[in-house]
Image (cartoon, rainbow, N blue to C red):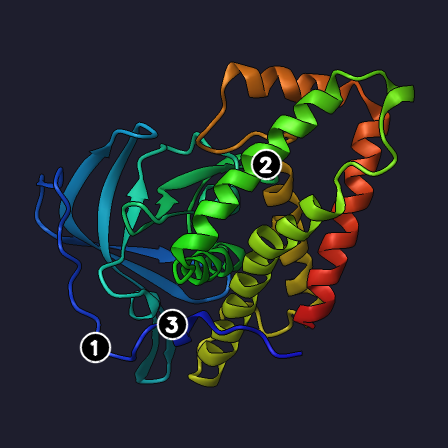
Amino acid sequence: MRFFNPENLFKKEERKEPVKPAGFEKFQESLIKQIETNNNNKIEIEYTGYRRFEHLYGQKLKEAGKIEIINKQGEQDKKFDFSSLLPKNWRFCERVTKGQVLSAGLNLLTSHYSKEIWFPDSYFDLESGKKTETFSRPEDLLGLLHEIGHSFESKETITKRITIKEKMKAKIGKLAGIKTEDLPVELFTEKEKQDYYQYIICPERDAWAFALRKCREAKRQGIDIFPKQASSEEILKIVRHCLCSALDAGIGIMKDPLEDSETMKIQREAIKGSKKLKSCWGEFKNRVIAGIIDKLR
């Protein structure tokens, strides 16, 4: 199975420094933060010293000019620069969250309107019960590659996806208020399924294919993003978990990291009380994810 390669949308050219949009201000000198990973790698994030307040979602953002993974091998360091993968005029920005989010994966976000990929400065790890620096775990880096894959999407795909997600959320919201015995056997019509696959599932599959391909490229350059003993199935298990969370958030069953209105909170509570609705969605979602994972193998 051959995948659409989003990189082909852009000519290969030397990446130039992105033009600063209105609103960025210089607040400190540039600096470098180093993060030790649990895989004996080191992450270097180079901050430019610029920041801005993003008004649409109310985010405090600090610009990161470069994100690089370094592996020391003898006298020579092996390096893999994530920034070099970005399309022209795109940038990384760190969201100031102070560990108040529960995962890096769900809070790594692609903002097409501002041409930015946002990552949280840290998150609260449920397993350890501690605040964890983003990118200290291999799965965070895989998620970053996935978001870079999304940055190559067309405007048509992005616009359609937003519309379809809103329609899906609205439909699930209506179904949540229906008596269990009156719920339809199939949640979505054939046309709704077709649109869902084309504008939501296919871009997700392509972005994960991009991420896995770049992991293999890094490995060929001497950088193991994952521990050497990690199997392909273990990595696909991480992909499966991320897909599950993203699809749930996409239709309002799980909390969206940025948009969480009172209406969506009420809808989530209604869905929790409908076992049949959760079961129908679960079966549909699991079929979709199984299809993506099979194509990624």
Calculate the distance from the C-alpha at mark 1 to the C-alpha at mark 2: 36 Å
In the image: residue 146, left or right of residue 98: right
> Which comes before the other along the chain, label 1 or label 3?
3
Q: Name the residue beneath numbered marker 2.
A: 249
Crowding at label 1, few (<14), some or many (≥20) Cα neighbours within 10 Å? Answer: few
Q: Residue furthest right?
A: 181
Amino acid type of the residue that numbered disc 2 sits on in the rendered structure = Ala
Crowding at label 2, few (<14), some or many (≥20) Cα neighbours within 10 Å? Answer: some
Which residue is nearer to you in this view: 48 or 295? Answer: 295
> Which comes before the other along the chain, label 1 or label 2?
1
Marking on residue 211: none
Amino acid type of the residue that numbered disc 1 sits on in the rendered structure = Glu
What SS does tag 2 mark? helix
Residue 58 spot, x, y in % from top left: 31, 27
Q: Which is in the foreground here, disc 3 or disc 2?
A: 3
In the image: residue 107, left or right of residue 183: left
Calculate the distance from the C-alpha at mark 3 to the C-alpha at mark 2: 28 Å
Q: Name the residue beneath numbered marker 3.
A: 9
In the image: residue 268, left or right of residue 291: left
Which residue is nearer to you in this view: 198 or 105? Answer: 198
Calculate the distance from the C-alpha at mark 1 to the C-alpha at mark 3: 15 Å
Q: Is residue 129 above or below residue 45?
A: above
Q: Quadrant of the C terminus?
A: bottom right
Q: Is residue 65 above or below residue 185?
A: below
Residue 273 spot, x, y in % from top left: 79, 18
Q: Quadrant of the N terminus?
A: bottom right
Q: Determine the residue positioned at 38% across, 72% down.
A: 9
> Which comes before the other along the chain, label 3 or label 2?
3
Which residue is nearer to you in this view: 8 or 156? Answer: 156
Q: Which is in the foreground here, disc 1 or disc 3?
A: 3
Amino acid type of the residue that numbered disc 3 sits on in the rendered structure = Leu
Q: Name the residue beneath numbered marker 1.
A: 14
